[in-house]
Amino acid sequence: MKIKKGDKILLFGELGAGKTTFSQFLIKNILKDIDYVSSPTFSIMNEYGEDIKIYHADLYRIADPYEIEYIDLFNDEEGIYLIEWAEYLDYLTPKNRLEIKIKYNEDIKYRDIEINYIGNEYDEKFQEELI
């Protein structure tokens, strides 16, 4: 499966599990000319790229889902969205999304990653990749 414009990638995991590290890796690999990706913990959302826009958001400090409406999340239909602490989206959770759950392994040095594609768009896309 390839990540494309318009994808919404929701990240779940405990504090320190590796959501930001995963996001940094993904952003640097999609936008080859980017050297530094900062955590959006305090800014809430960072934007990267020109031809391909990637929006990296961290909802940890959001107290109420209604606050998310004020940060223009998901307004760019062609933008790729990486959302940390996606459980805070509540009623704003996109119908079509890729969910990545990062969990500590028994050996704390390692992580277990679970990936789920949700929505008709991903069902069709996943089938295309298998053919």
Image (cartoon, rainbow, N blue to C red):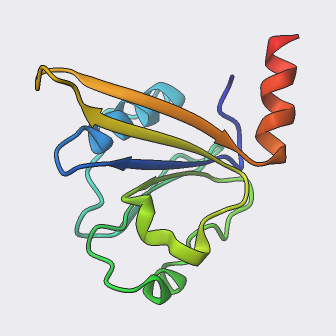
The residue lying furthest to the top in this view is: 131
Image position, residue 128 (x, y; %): 87, 21
Q: Quadrant of residue 69?
A: bottom right
Quadrant location of the C terminus?
A: top right
Residue furthest toward the front?
A: 106
Does residue 1 appear to the left or right of 110 in the view shown? right
**Residue, far left:** 108
- Residue 55 location in percent, x, y? 50, 56
Left/right of residue 118 with respect to residue 87 in the rendered view:
right
**Tag count in the figure?**
0
Residue shown at 36%/59% (left/top)? 85
Q: Position of residue 32 (x, y in %)?
A: 48, 26
Q: Quadrant of residue 127?
A: top right
- 129 vs 66, left or right, is right
Please indicate whether residue 122 sits to the left or right of residue 14 in the image: right
Residue at image point 43% right, 48% down: 11
Snapshot quadrant of residue 41:
bottom left
Q: Residue at x 29, y 36 (%)?
A: 103
Q: Is residue 42 above or below residue 121?
A: below
Q: Position of residue 17 (x, y in %)?
A: 22, 40
Q: Nearer the viewer, residue 128 or 123?
A: 123
What residue lies at 66% left-to-right and 62% top-to-bottom? Answer: 94
Q: Please identify the quadrant where the N terminus is shown.
A: top right
